[in-house]
Structure formats: structure tokens, C-alpha cells
Image (spheres, rainbow, N blue to C red):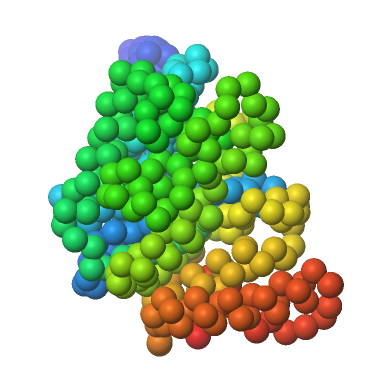
Amino acid sequence: MLARRRFLQVLAALAISQVLPAPAHAADFGSKDGPAPANVDEIAGVLRQDPYDLELLISFGTSKGGSAGHLALAIRDQAAGDDLVYSANFYADRSAEHAVNFYTRDLMVAIPKNEYLFGTVSSLDPKAAFGLDFGEIYKRSVVGVRVRGVPAAEKLALAAFFRRLNDDYHNRARNTEYHDREIRYDYLRLNCAKTIGSAFRYGAGYKDVEIAGTKILPGVTRLVAALNANIPTEMAMKLLAAWNKRGYGMDVVLYRKYEGSTYVDPHEDEKVAFKDLPNRFPSVLSRDFRKEQGHYEDYDNVYAMYLLYNLGRYSVRVNGETKRLEIDRAQNVMGYVEAADRAAKTARSDSENLQRRLGFTPQGTTIEEAPVR
């Protein structure tokens, strides 16, 4: 009797095992739906003790050579206890492929900054892109240029322009003052750098910030469009100069890439874990775009890397052992005028020596080495 009862129990267990789904494998740290650092709010609180109004977020490139990276803008206190990041949606291009597998509801997505940088779960949509719409630091480093002294009216005007971009995208508007085609994402013609730059020029009234390619003749080749494209680092340098002209203060936070993420984007043809992707400073349009690896040599690239280092105040990283965020603080932070002057002098000399392939000790320091000073 006992043997028969045991036999029936085993049969029942086998039947249940065929019906119930297998337990899901827990996602790794630094992966989509996995654990995030436990002390994000604590470190964010330290950074928010400083008075700033905006933060321009310059993401490193993840492709070989001098990839352009990404540009987004955070406006302080537009989310509950956090800043709100406005970021151009790479997939809002109305292509059939992207409409199926990606979030395409808005052209300009709005994401709380902690989620944008450190989140592993999206509050936006299940189709949001990990490493782009949220969890940036698991895929690449991000440089944050914080701006203080910005009038409240200017912040409201920027947010209003981003809402207008979404309205124009929803309404399929065409031939606006800021773009001469249908309003949808285009990597060359209406990209992240152009949307951010346009918000300042057409939303906040920065007439001194030039936007490339606002009106391009129809039928031009991709090469011509590329030569007229707005590039994240180039746009960032224009905005820094404009903020200095208006008397705004600036400093820099480097959010370092977590080097241990095993996440592989299922949508990519080449299956490469985030930890193995390149993590390169976003290049200006220059010969450095052709470089597979090694140091950048172009003056504008070297200048930008030196300037951002000179403005550096903090560096934030994930401790690989504790899986907690740690923050380093620079001893001295330069003002923009001193930082730009020093970057120009050292970049000129170092760029020439790099192009000559001379063995030398660089006079400047790149943002990737922040904040050791």
C-alpha cells in the first residue's frame, strides 16, 4: 500500500512539473530586470546638495572607431525628488521594424535621471531600450555638465519645446522653423544633438547657438547629410560657450561605465555583452572617426576631453565587489574661462605631438581620468 501511494505521489509531482513553468533565472547585476546599486538615492542626494539647474548628459560611443555617442538634457526637479531627462528616441523613425520591437510613442522620451543612469527596470514602457532609455552606465560612461544660475523661465521654455517636439511628431508636422522634413527621428537630419540644440535656440532663445542642417536641399546624398549633421560633442561645446557667455556656472560629473555587465541586447545582430562593447569618448566629425582604437588626435576631440576634465568635480562608479556606487571628489574645480584656456593650450601641443607620432608626456588630462587632480 505504501509503495502504491508513493508511486501515485511521484506521478502527481511529474504531472505538476509539466504544467507549472520553470522558475525564471534571476537577471545578473547590471542587466535588464536585474538588481541595481542599493545606494543610488544616497549618492544622488550627495550630488543634489550642489546648486545646479540643468545637466547636459554626454554619453560615450559604443561602436568601433570614433562613434558619436548620445546627447540628452536633464532639468532639475521636474520628477518627484529627481531631475527629468529629455532624450531623443532613436527608434521613433517610423520604420516598420522599430514600430514592432521598440518604444516609439514619443520622439522625446522623459525619464527620471536616476533611472536613466542606473535603472534596470523602465518606468516608460516594457519596450524601452536598456542602455539607452535607462541603465546607461551599464553600457557606457556618461559625462554630466551641470549648469547653475539658469532662470526658471528658461527651464520652462526648454520643457515646453520638448513637448512641442512630441506634438509635432504625433501630428506628423513638416517644414517647421527647426526642421525641413517630417518630424521623426533621423540619425543624420534630426538626431539627439539637433533636438537638444534646437530646444535652446528655438525654445529658450539662444540665437547664438548655430544648428547645422536646418534647411538641406531635397535629394542630397547621405554623405552631404552626414557632413551637415549635428554631432553630440560639437553641440555640447557650443552650449558650454553659450552658458559661459550668459554668466552661468558649470561643473562636471563623470558617471563611469560598470565594466561587468553580461547583458546582451537581443535586438543586435552581433551578440556582444555590454562589458565587451567599446566605451569611447564621443568624437567630433574628424579623421578620428576612422580610428578603430588608440588615442584621438584631432584638436577638437582633445580640447573637449581636456575641457571636461578641467571642469570635473565628481566621478561616480560602481564598486565591482560591493555592487554599490562610490563617489570621488576633485580637490579643485576650475571656472569655465580658466578651464577652456588651459584646455586650448595643452590640446594644441598634445594634438600636434600625437599626429606626429612622437613619444611624449601629454600636458593635458582627459575626462576619462577624472577626477584625479
Image spot of residue 78 (x, y percent): 18, 49
Q: Residue at x 69, y 54 (%)?
A: 286
Q: For this rendering, which residue is in front, 220 or 282?
A: 220
318 is higher (above) or lower (below) than 128: below
Screen quadrant of the N terminus: top left
- Image side of residue 65 versus residue 206, left or right: right
**The quadrant where residue 222 appears:** top right
Q: For this rendering, which residue is in front, 268 or 259?
A: 268
Image spot of residue 340 (x, y percent): 50, 76
Residue 117 at least partly seen: no
Q: Across the whole image, how many numbered discs are drawn on residues?
A: 0
Q: Residue at x 53, y 56 (%)?
A: 233
Image spot of residue 220 (x, y percent): 64, 26
Image spot of residue 335 (x, y percent): 39, 80
Q: Residue at x 70, y 50 (%)?
A: 289
Q: For this rendering, which residue is in front, 214 or 222?
A: 214
Residue 346 at least partly seen: yes
**The quadrant where residue 111 appears:** top left
- Image side of residue 219 versus residue 115, left or right: right
291 is higher (above) or lower (below) than 178: below
